[in-house]
Amino acid sequence: MTSHQVLTRSLAVLALLGCSNAPGAPPLTSDSLRLVPVVTSGLSSPVYLTAPSGDTARLFVVEQSGQIRVVQHGQLLPAAFLDIHTRLVSGGEQGLLSVAFHPNYATNGFFYVNYTDLNGDTRVERYTVSAADSNLADTATHKLILFIPQPYANHNGGLVMFGPDGMLYIGMGDGGSGGDPENRAQNPDSLLGKLLRIDVDHGDPYAIPANNPFATSGGAPEIWALGLRNPWRFAFDRSAGLLYIGDVGQGAWEEVDVQSASQGGLNYGWRIMEGAHCYNPTNCSSAGLVLPAVEYDHSSGQCAIIGGFVYRGTRSPTLAGQYFYADLCAAWVRSFSYGGGAVTGQTSWNLDVSPGTPLSFGEDARGELYLLTGGGDVYRIAQ
């Protein structure tokens, strides 16, 4: 038996035991978690939540249908902050998928959205807040930053987020269909199946950071990392300098990747590997590829990972340093701690309410975490 076969069999046994770890990682333990209701009516398909830096009074919730709603002092405002539903197609994996506020939003009013347009292609656009009303965007200010054709309707990725380095990161799926038929995730000339990194403070509409891995030659200069299938979603732990990526699997394995946020050019394996397992070719080599920190299989109704954030808030100090994630179909919530290059603890959470289908996590300006569900509910995570 080859070493790869031994690894695969070991992971399969762990999965049957209910574990979601690489070999040698601690098993899942159980604990209780509270979901504090924040919004229980008025939202439709909320797929992301965030807030500008320092804005502790508001939450901005992205609705897939094309609106961004404001929750101010715990109340959902009736008017949308942004409404671009006429500019996009929504449903399935398409629609308005995220918003990112510029680190200097308080002074420049810039924010960036990622959506699939009327043809199903990805657009990253910049908007500016209204000068007259801080709860209203000026839709006339839209400026196209990046356009990426999408060959299929699924695997759009869709997250835009500013990293601790001030660069704008964009998560892109492999373009869709099944099995990445054109092998785009491994193609360094394609922006699909990648994590992109651009400088929106220089150039028009952006500049390429000098330390991007293909900044001068050999591939698309916007690429920061490759080998992703459908990153839903990624997150930076600024305290530990780590990047977490929840990458949705094909038909067997879901994964979370954890690496240094400052290391570019990493290859997360797809379509060569699904999780820590060969996919195409079936007798693959994992040399040069990043293997997941955590993976789980599709037993017990599990189907697709919902990536979250590392808790760095103050209201639940016992949760500090734990990365939260969920499964779309099984509807559980789990977390793990990571340090020294390895998973150091894992928890399966017993929730005090049944939230329904998890769609996304969110983080506010204080570092508190939220769970968004298919029923339109928003909960704050607490212990």
Image: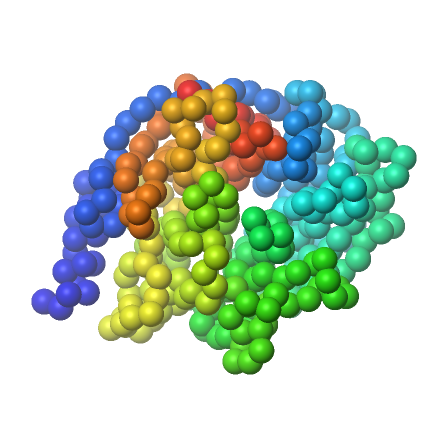
Q: Residue at x 42, y 30 (%)?
A: 320
Q: Is residue 128 visible?
A: yes
Q: Number of callouts in the render?
A: 0
**In which quarter of the view is residue 47 placed?**
top right
Q: Residue furthest right?
A: 132
Residue at image position (75%, 53%) is 126
Q: Is residue 344 left or right of residue 42?
A: left
Compared to 198, does 237 lie above or below? above
Q: Position of residue 163 (x, y in %)?
A: 57, 50
In percent of the image, x 87 and y 50: which residue is there? 140
Using residue 196 as the reference point, say whether residue 138 is left or right of it.
right
Residue 66 visible in this rendered orientation of the protein: no
Residue 345 spot, x, y in % from top left: 28, 36
> In screen coordinates, is 130 left or right of 161?
right
Q: Quadrant of the C terminus?
A: top left
Image x and y of residue 228, in percent: 45, 61
**Quadrant for the N terminus in the image:** bottom left
Identify the residue at the far left of this view.
1
Determine which quarter of the picture holds residue 138: top right
Residue ID at (58%, 53%): 165
- Position of residue 369 relative to residue 211, above or below, is above
